[in-house]
Image (cartoon, coloured by chain):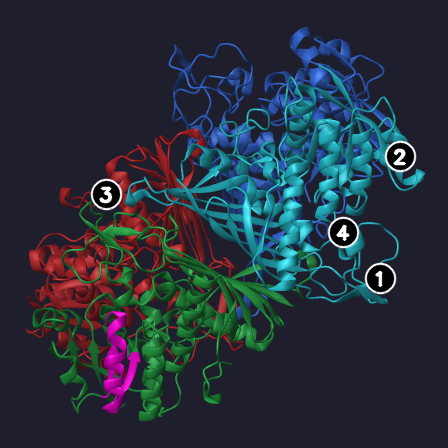
Chain colours: A red, B blue, C cyan, D green
Amino acid sequence: MRDVNIALIGGGFMGKAHSLAYAAMPMFFWPAPARPIRKVVVDATDELARTAADRYGWERHSSSWQEIVDDPTIDVVDIATPNHLHAEIAIAAANAGKHVICEKPLAPTADEARLMLEAVERAGVVNAVAFNYRRTPAVVLARKYIENGDIGDILNFRGTYLQDWSADPNSPLSWRFQKKIAGSGAIGDIGSHVVDLARYLVGEIAEVNSLVSTWIKERPLQSGGFDTLGTAKVSSGPRGTVDVDDEAVTLVRFSNGAVGSLEASRNAWGRNNFLTFEIHGTRGSLVFNYERRDELQVAFADDPADRRGFRTVYTGPATPYGEALWPIPALGIGYGETKIIEAYELMKAVETGDRIRPDFADGYQAALVDEAIATSGATHEWVKVEPVPTGAHAQR
Amino acid sequence: MRDVNIALIGGGFMGKAHSLAYAAMPMFFWPAPARPIRKVVVDATDELARTAADRYGWERHSSSWQEIVDDPTIDVVDIATPNHLHAEIAIAAANAGKHVICEKPLAPTADEARLMLEAVERAGVVNAVAFNYRRTPAVVLARKYIENGDIGDILNFRGTYLQDWSADPNSPLSWRFQKKIAGSGAIGDIGSHVVDLARYLVGEIAEVNSLVSTWIKERPLQSGGFDTLGTAKVSSGPRGTVDVDDEAVTLVRFSNGAVGSLEASRNAWGRNNFLTFEIHGTRGSLVFNYERRDELQVAFADDPADRRGFRTVYTGPATPYGEALWPIPALGIGYGETKIIEAYELMKAVETGDRIRPDFADGYQAALVDEAIATSGATHEWVKVEPVPTGAHAQR
Amino acid sequence: MRDVNIALIGGGFMGKAHSLAYAAMPMFFWPAPARPIRKVVVDATDELARTAADRYGWERHSSSWQEIVDDPTIDVVDIATPNHLHAEIAIAAANAGKHVICEKPLAPTADEARLMLEAVERAGVVNAVAFNYRRTPAVVLARKYIENGDIGDILNFRGTYLQDWSADPNSPLSWRFQKKIAGSGAIGDIGSHVVDLARYLVGEIAEVNSLVSTWIKERPLQSGGFDTLGTAKVSSGPRGTVDVDDEAVTLVRFSNGAVGSLEASRNAWGRNNFLTFEIHGTRGSLVFNYERRDELQVAFADDPADRRGFRTVYTGPATPYGEALWPIPALGIGYGETKIIEAYELMKAVETGDRIRPDFADGYQAALVDEAIATSGATHEWVKVEPVPTGAHAQR
Amino acid sequence: MRDVNIALIGGGFMGKAHSLAYAAMPMFFWPAPARPIRKVVVDATDELARTAADRYGWERHSSSWQEIVDDPTIDVVDIATPNHLHAEIAIAAANAGKHVICEKPLAPTADEARLMLEAVERAGVVNAVAFNYRRTPAVVLARKYIENGDIGDILNFRGTYLQDWSADPNSPLSWRFQKKIAGSGAIGDIGSHVVDLARYLVGEIAEVNSLVSTWIKERPLQSGGFDTLGTAKVSSGPRGTVDVDDEAVTLVRFSNGAVGSLEASRNAWGRNNFLTFEIHGTRGSLVFNYERRDELQVAFADDPADRRGFRTVYTGPATPYGEALWPIPALGIGYGETKIIEAYELMKAVETGDRIRPDFADGYQAALVDEAIATSGATHEWVKVEPVPTGAHAQR
């Protein structure tokens, strides 16, 4: 088994999740396609980087991503920084011939995402975008049913991603509420996951029409820590302006004739990580709620009427990735497992050179959808989404 | 307690539900505001009418609604026919000075609904439209929370009404699939209930944008029975064209600034009577699913973080209408109870002369929304909804 | 269709439910086996009886059940009084040649239940005990699956009936907490329903071992109203002693080799009418919760592993009694429907003379189980349950 | 931060879970109390051990646990073997002065468990038993509510652990079905977890009465692999006798006056890892289902009646261990997290020398309960459970 040397840029929450994934992946997938080596972690300061190395088990640390990107011993650059740094790092890494995995959304703007895509294609390197929720075994099982034709042709998709960690007007103005860093608000941060699931399960989105709202227009300025997702304490200090969206509700028309809606909100009290979908096909339906992620619900039209209804299937050894994960269903899929599967797919691509999905083309396509949502929110009109112009990238 | 003489037009499924309501209402609400007397039932033929009278406990029967509407002993005309007959009967009844309750949607077109509204206003009679689902105690409780300000200002409403009884392409082309009788398909039949809930709980809908689909374009011609909702057997005989919608997915903008989406579909395998809403406010959220109608879920922002989450409240004696219904929560609210409460409110209005809600103004307003949805589905543009032009009718 | 004249003894909550059932039954079941006529209602005083007649639609009223039982125009005596009156009335009615339906539990003691059984058998009259929960369509569907062998041989049954309407120590000392009237507490009041479901679905209970507790040993003395189920206001007045049980947790061994447990409690905060069962068979499982009574969950061993899981089946036209009830699933089964089906089965038995189940033999058998539970709670030993000694009464 | 050298005995499914925990713990808990070093892994053959080391990231490997237990560089011996090896290894490790963590159940018999307890007490080493499910954050939150008195005094506990991975009579006769290796069947394998939760949340179990069943009396002899939990393929080959239980249903009486029931079954089709409890207290109730382990349901008596009901609380930063785990609720607790918390508590105990719970005294006490269950299953009598005779070990 070959060693693959990773450089991780960003030692925050996402850095932790990626570190876990690299450490744990071969424990689950064995023999692993390649062994990810936690070579070097980069953070904004030497102290942050040193702590990240110590905590997450990286051999070295650095406060200069530029040096690391040029380091000839590195095979893969893993970008887990705030959004506004993605493009610069990814392009430099690609130019240096490194494989790249980048957190989502790929970039604050579709333009930057395009540049990133061009860079990795030019360089011919493996490139992945970290839409980890499509790695949830129950989501992969949904796709398997769809590919088998088990629910017929898809008519309708409804997706939501609802949270409430920032529903309080006194939760701080972190980078996630600043356009220059994040690009957008709920649209890119969580809506992009719904877009990714829609594309993964149904197909390309051709057109959108959206209502985009910023419900909380000012938030307390943040002192101290970089990213306060979730754990932020409320504050009553001086306030700054929020220039991104809190919520988007969107109609979508798919290229293949299906229709649907997407809803992303950070103002949904009582919803924590409510990433859900419901899909109606001509021969059945699928329902998923990430908050109960071990389960997929499926209804088959062909069941006799007196025993027809949603089946609650728990993923496990008999469902995708299941033999590698835990030996019985409902032992418990957590967030980590989605990242472990992601790391497995990345190592497989690095080893084989095959395309990994979702890749930068997917990330760029999702960014185009996100941008269309934002545009429609401003213009109140249907906005077409251009397909990423290369056959290789056509989804499904 | 005064007797109020009812004439029921239509002895099908809805006639049964209304008959039950009149018989049972005083058993639940005591002393009743007035006692509904099942005086006469009308159906298309003498035989149908006789059977309806016998089965549903009406004193007399007739096959001529025209005669009945002129009968001086009748106080209330109750219209439970297919949609295309609503206007003619209601207008004649109003002109004859009868109070009127009419099944939903009020009429196949908004124009007819307007004529009906004008007739009852001219006549000054009590008028009600039978959007019974807002009578569900859990829905009334939701409204009470909202009116109390318990969830703050409403930001977002998502409503669905999903069924599958006609998802099979071999289910028959009943009147519900014929525009000249029904006016529209899922939009008027079930979508109108979602529109009613949205108006009841959030406020007036100002604008809509909709995707409207007819997924099954031909269905077997129906022989025999009039209305085959649900119990219809599939058939492989000759087919006719469906000229109404199967599904509508709609963005909505409310007059008060809230936004949201509505989804109505008769092609959602596994969903039976999936009338749901989720409402996000600045201080809390509400979730309801009619398939589990004894329950309302509510999350309050003010609960401490380590004990915050959706509370599943079962309606009962402590919640609206509860003292009249069953003595403990979860003994079981069924479809009948929604109609019994409806009958109670109707008798109260007949006795007091006070306005009942929802009335024809509400029915007309809902028809305007329905029509806007259909128009938007055809034009792919946002369509404004005019408010019914009388102060008296402003909702909330 | 023949008229069957009913005399109802007891105009409280149960009288209401029975009145509704008689009025509504032919509306649902048509042609009805016979038409129940609400002839006369009896209550403790003339005033109560008059109000009951007025409210529940009975032709006459009386404050003397003795007179009514001898009334030659009466066909059926329906006993909806507190438990301690059941035996005297039922025996008198049987002796007068009336058919009898009696609320559950059949009597405060098994001895009285036996006398009642002997009386109806001697008289050869139709006799029924009102275990209405086994009338829930989802429960009947469960039985159908079991009879079909769909879940194989039954291994295990777990049943619960949990409520909290009297969990507050300040809720009043109604008759339900007095041994001389009620016979027992949770055991007879709600536990008997679980026993009935266990017998209906699995078979005869051969032996029990029980933990019986009285958690609240004193309650405020009750002034005024007779039965304060659910709606009782808490009180801080003088207190009397509770001499019945609040809770029983019981191991059971069935005659056919299955095992299981029963739990009945009126001290389960948050549970309202939590009548549930879970049944494991050699080829599948069943799960039911009356609080969500439109649904039955069933898992089949024979489903392929990647699509196996509990199916949530909503009862409707395709399931037992469904054609008579509502035209699509989840329109909504309420408490009333269980009583309507009960009335239908009663009229069918009166018309045909066939045995109805559950009958007094079932009620007596349940009383024997209840008594064994109470005995075991006192002796801390396994207590055998004698089968009612007549072949005709063997369950299933 | 001090390094703590671990020797892992057993490289199967449990070895994987423990390896993950050691690797991931400091990533979550930082600064970690100590850093677990994956020093050496032992398995039955050199080849198995080499693979385990390679896969799970251990520095060395061995096929002789005896050698390893004497290795002076080892601080902690982690026993993840089949049950019959626990005692010998643990006693040797304790005698060699090593801290010990042992998988559950502590031993096949209570006698062996007692010897293990005596050995670690004699040696004065840290000792832990791996009842990981009490590490689930939602379970720890339940305990916090109870300790705060939020649900008052506990009246009743119902616990279940239901699975179906071996419900098929053709699933193989692995060591888990052989008394000489496993000691018992469902009782020790899964029932012991329920016993642990009952003791953790309610208190000591004083007495049990149990129905113990072996539903499948013969299973196919197993060729090849050691432990086939879950992933086993069914087989139609020659069969051997199962001499352990498949299921136990048990009444329990707690020392503090509470009562309840426990159910453990491996024959519950449709249940995967259905570890649940429901607890009724004088002021509230708790409900937990590990299959939806991010959630705890709690009902408070003090909530006003029109907003009372079970709250579904998702664990996260505001609940126990939450700051160390994931930044928002419902990001996803998996099986791994329960083991990561276990590793954290172990390292804390090793570092501080404080008692860890659950320890060998807890494991012995649970074994006494298990044995009482088995005895009662054979004798059909109540069986008292002796408290482990040392003040230090009294639970709670």
D196 on left or right of B310: left
Mark 2–mark 4 Cα distance, whole angstroms, equals: 21 Å
Reply yes or no: does residue D77 show up in magenta.
yes
* Alpha carbons under labels 1 and 3: distance apart: 76 Å
Q: Chain of mark 3?
A: A
**Mark 3 surroundings: few (<14), some (14-19) or many (≥20) residues within 10 A:** some
Which chain does tag 1 point to? C
- According to the picture, the residue beneath numbered tag 1 turns out to be C221
Mark 4: secondary structure: helix
Between the C-alphas of marks 1 and 2, the distance is: 30 Å
* Helix, strand or loop status at disc 3: loop
Dot 2: element? helix
A9 magenta-colored: no
Q: Which residue is mark 3?
A: A387
Res C66 label: 2
Please, is residue A190 above or below residue D395 in the view?
above
C57 with respect to C353 (left or right): right
Type of the residue with mark 1: Leu
Give the labeled residue for mark 4: C182
Q: Nearer the viewer, mark 4 or mark 3?
A: 4
Report the mark closest to the observer, 1 or 3: 1
- Are the residues flagged by discs 2 and 4 from a single subunit? yes
Is residue D211 at all visible to an observer of this figure?
Answer: yes
Q: Is residue D239 above or below residue A80?
A: above
**Residue B6 - label:** none
Residue A259 image position (x, y, % from top left): 37, 37
Q: Check disc 4: other Cα within 10 Å, few if <14, some if 14-19, many if 20+.
A: many
Q: Are marks 1 and 4 in contact (CB under 8 Å)?
A: no
- Which stretch did the figure color magenta? D75-101
